[in-house]
């Protein structure tokens, strides 16, 4: 039976059999027992399915991965120990030294560094493009060795909305998949596969968990990209893997080739699995994701409107505000609401911004976002500290930008806290 998102949030993943625990159990075990050598050997050869070592698969983790997969509408999902690991795996699964990919420049600071600095050290080059450029300008970035296109549904922290359908078409025209980081929208507000995206990634640390209890990530495969049609570009998927007895992923796993390679090759060799305890906590968060997201959006909309009308505020970027540059894209991709994250700047100096933040009461200064509790951050002095002013601008982060992550408290209290702090500047 095909279920609605709300039901998947609550019921997806763990399917207990007769007499098994109703609630997803925490299989806090690195290993699993078998009674014969042969049974275990078949698992290593990928001939049989079963658990043998938690780095490769664990029942708690798998149940949560299955839920996220169902929410996004994919053919398979792998959970990682962080969002950073998820984005690294998503790219590294199809790019190797000598390859190239294209990314939107309005992306999370950590991803910006991963792509621009660390992947470069591995011999993987990327070109940062401004999604606001014309198709013609962006298409100049494609090279014969380009392997994918990357963007964030709603960028962190700028709040720019990514035109998924446009970039999916462009990527496909050049024979490469589109990878979208859907962290801020969550599948409750946007399902990128429905717009032609091929691979979705998440930092589950944010709304999916929603309570700031675990750091985690996910990669989900739509199964839609035809790797065999561009076999020369993706030899890792379409030619024998010597480290797996010469198995070819596209031949052996069909639509699940990409996601199976991540698990059986990258997880095996690089690790970065989440702990079962963390997956249990993530699952609790997911059970209420469909209730929390609308409340985040409703509160953020009211706070954004209040900020917009406030004479002390220089500018507000929230795609739910009519007149916002991304309003039309948000109406198309996020008709039920975007997320709780607002970017804004105060009139006055940088010190005024600091004074405002320090004067807040329960709205806390934390290096976090997309959580039940309202919080603020000044990216230029916190998360994006390592970027130069020019890189900041390139990443769509103004030096005076305050990132306000609106929680699910009573919105009148949130506004009252912002108001009393603003009176102190
Ligand atoms: C936080 C974040 C990441 C990184 O995730 P971690 O779980 O902190 O490693 C990646 N992408 C986006 C959009 C994020 O907000």
Image (cartoon, helix red, strand yellow):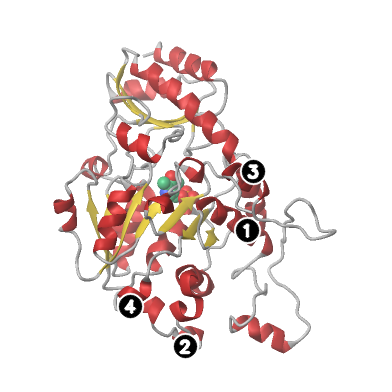
In the depicted structure, whether residue 78 falls above or below residue 405: below
**Where residue 151 appears, x then y in whole percent?**
33, 51
**Where residue 272 appears, x then y in whole percent?**
53, 63
Provide the residue designation for mark 4: 231
Q: Nearer the viewer, mark 1 or mark 2?
A: 2
As helix, strand or loop, the secondary structure at mark 4 comes to: loop
Comes first in the chain, label 1 or label 2 = 2
Residues at circles 2 and 4 in contact by the CB criterion of under 8 Å: no
Classify the position of the C terminus by image quarter: top left
As helix, strand or loop, the secondary structure at mark 3 comes to: loop
Residue 275 image label:
1
As helix, strand or loop, the secondary structure at mark 2 comes to: loop
Classify the position of the N terminus by image quarter: bottom right
**Where residue 144 appears, x then y in whole percent?**
20, 70
Residue drawn where x is 38% and y is 29% of the image: 320
Provide the residue designation for mark 2: 246
Comes first in the chain, label 3 or label 1 = 1
In the depicted structure, whether residue 167 falls above or below residue 413: below
Q: What is the crowding at mark 2: few (fewer than 14 residues within 10 Å), some, or many (at least 20)?
A: few
As helix, strand or loop, the secondary structure at mark 1 comes to: loop
Report the Cα–Cα distance between label 2 and label 3.
41 Å
Report the Cα–Cα distance between label 4 and label 1.
35 Å
Report the Cα–Cα distance between label 3 and label 1.
19 Å
In the depicted structure, whether residue 70 falls above or below residue 213: below
Residue 220 as seen in the image, left or right of residue 133: right
Provide the residue designation for mark 3: 287
Q: What is the crowding at mark 1: few (fewer than 14 residues within 10 Å), some, or many (at least 20)?
A: many
Residue drawn where x is 35% and y is 79% of the image: 235
């Amino acid at each position: 039976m095909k279920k609605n998102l709300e039901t998947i949030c609550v019921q997806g993943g763990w399917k207990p059999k007769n007499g098994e625990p109703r609630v997803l159990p925490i299989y806090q075990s690195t290993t699993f027992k078998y009674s014969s050598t042969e049974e275990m050997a078949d698992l290593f050869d990928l001939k049989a399915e079963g658990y043998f070592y938690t780095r490769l698969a664990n029942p708690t983790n798998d149940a949560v991965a299955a839920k996220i997969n169902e929410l996004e509408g994919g053919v398979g999902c792998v959970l990682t120990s962080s969002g950073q690991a998820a984005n690294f795996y998503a790219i590294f699964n199809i790019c190797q030294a000598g390859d190239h990919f294209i990314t939107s420049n309005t992306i999370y600071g950590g991803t910006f560094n991963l792509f621009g600095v660390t992947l470069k050290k591995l011999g993987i080059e990327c070109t940062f493009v401004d999604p606001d450029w014309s198709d013609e300008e962006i298409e100049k970035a494609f090279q014969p060795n380009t392997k994918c296109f990357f963007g964030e549904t709603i960028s962190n922290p700028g709040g720019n909305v990514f035109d998924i359908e446009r970039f999916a078409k462009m990527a496909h025209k050049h024979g490469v998949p589109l990878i979208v980081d859907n962290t801020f929208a969550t599948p409750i507000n946007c399902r990128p596969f429905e717009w032609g995206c091929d691979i979705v990634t998440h930092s589950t640390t944010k709304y999916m968990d929603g309570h700031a209890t675990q750091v985690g990530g996910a990669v989900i495969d739509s199964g839609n990209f035809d790797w065999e049609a561009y076999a020369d570009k993706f030899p890792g998927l379409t030619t024998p893997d010597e480290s797996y007895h010469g198995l070819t992923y596209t031949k052996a796993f069909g639509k699940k080739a990409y996601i199976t390679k991540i698990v059986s090759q990258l997880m095996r060799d690089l690790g970065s699995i989440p702990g079962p305890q963390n997956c249990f906590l993530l699952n609790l968060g997911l059970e209420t994701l469909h209730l929390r997201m609308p409340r985040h959006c409703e509160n953020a909309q009211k706070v954004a409107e209040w900020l917009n009308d406030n004479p002390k505020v220089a500018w507000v970027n929230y795609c739910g505000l009519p007149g916002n540059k991304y309003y039309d894209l948000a109406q198309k991709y996020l008709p039920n609401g975007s997320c709780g994250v607002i970017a804004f700047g105060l009139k006055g100096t940088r010190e005024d911004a600091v004074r405002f933040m320090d004067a807040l009461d329960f709205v806390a200064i934390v290096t976090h976002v997309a959580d039940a509790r309202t919080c603020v951050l000044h990216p230029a002095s916190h998360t994006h500290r390592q970027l130069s002013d020019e890189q900041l601008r390139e990443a769509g982060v103004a030096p005076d930008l305050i990132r306000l992550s609106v929680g699910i408290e009573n919105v009148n209290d949130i506004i009252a806290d912002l108001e009393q702090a603003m009176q102190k500047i």
